[in-house]
Image (cartoon, helix red, strand yellow):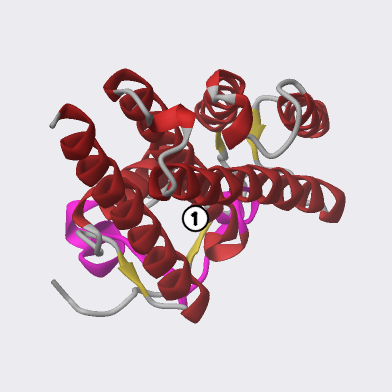
Amino acid sequence: MTGRIPEPSESPRGHEPYGEARWPMATAVVTAMVLTVLLPDDLRLAPRWLLPAVEGLLLLALIAGDPGRIDRRSTALRTLSIALVGVLALSAVWSTVQLVDDILHGGKETASATGLLQSGGTVWACTVLAFSLLYFELDSGGPAARAHRLPRASALAFPQQLNPEVASADWRPRYIDYLYLGLTNATAFSPTDVMPLAAWAKIAMGIQSLVSLLILGLVVARAVNVLA
């Protein structure tokens, strides 16, 4: 590996920037909405349909403002995207705190093995989706900015950036890359193939690792207690 980020990659002259399809990101948001609905009442930040409704409206506004592929650079759309990620992250953090409290105090939502695994697994999946969308939206100015240009100083360094020989000349990180980052960081509790370079990326990945470790550790410990 070269150990450095190559020069900024521009869209070819005379060609429109090629943004990624909206549907992977939209699928992740809809999945998070469904998981929020499935959570027990005590683990949700708001009434069952409130947050999914807000998230759905924000997603529809994004699709209407930039349909098809994500390549329109707009302050309004950028604000909507960050607001959507913020709502998802806030919901996931709140559910994590409530889950931890329920486990520590022997609450009803984690009193049975089935309820424990369902609640713990749902909250954990919500955190993975929320952080993957956070990385997706904040890295290199967001997906619309990446469609036009990859900056030299990226917040997250992917293997294809550190070793350009393994990637095509017009390679860009897509949502699946950020989902993989969120999943591996939540299971390995540390960076795997993607290195955080910016301070916010290190903080976000560190928080996600601690949250995931807390959820999985307490769920396992509680499961042993329940089954015993």
Mark 1 surroundings: few (<14), some (14-19) or many (≥20) residues within 10 A: many
In the figure, is residue 78 to the left or right of 133?
Answer: right
Tag count in the figure? 1
Q: Position of residue 200 (x, y in %)?
A: 52, 74
Question: Residue, x 39% and y 31% (percent of image)?
Answer: 110
Question: Residue, x 54% and y 64% (percent of image)?
Answer: 140
Where 185 sits versus 47, above or below? Answer: below
Question: Residue, x 35% and y 29% (percent of image)?
Answer: 116
Where 182 sits versus 68, above or below? Answer: below
Locate the C terminus by quadrant.
top left
Q: Amino acid at mark 1?
A: Tyr
Q: Position of residue 26 (x, y in %)?
A: 59, 27
Q: Nearer the viewer, residue 155 or 148?
A: 155
Question: Residue, x 69% and y 39% (percent of image)?
Answer: 45
Q: Nearer the viewer, residue 195 or 131?
A: 131
For label 1, the residue is 135
Q: Position of residue 227 (x, y in %)?
A: 16, 28
Q: Position of residue 73 (x, y in %)?
A: 75, 51
The magenta segment: 142-168
User: Residue 168, can we see it?
Assistant: no
Q: Spot the residue most to the right.
A: 76
Q: Nearer the viewer, residue 33 or 196?
A: 33
Locate the N terminus by quadrant.
bottom left
In magenta segment, residue 160 = yes
Where 161 sits versus 57, above or below? Answer: below
User: Residue 7, can we see it?
Assistant: yes
Q: Nearer the viewer, residue 165 or 58?
A: 58
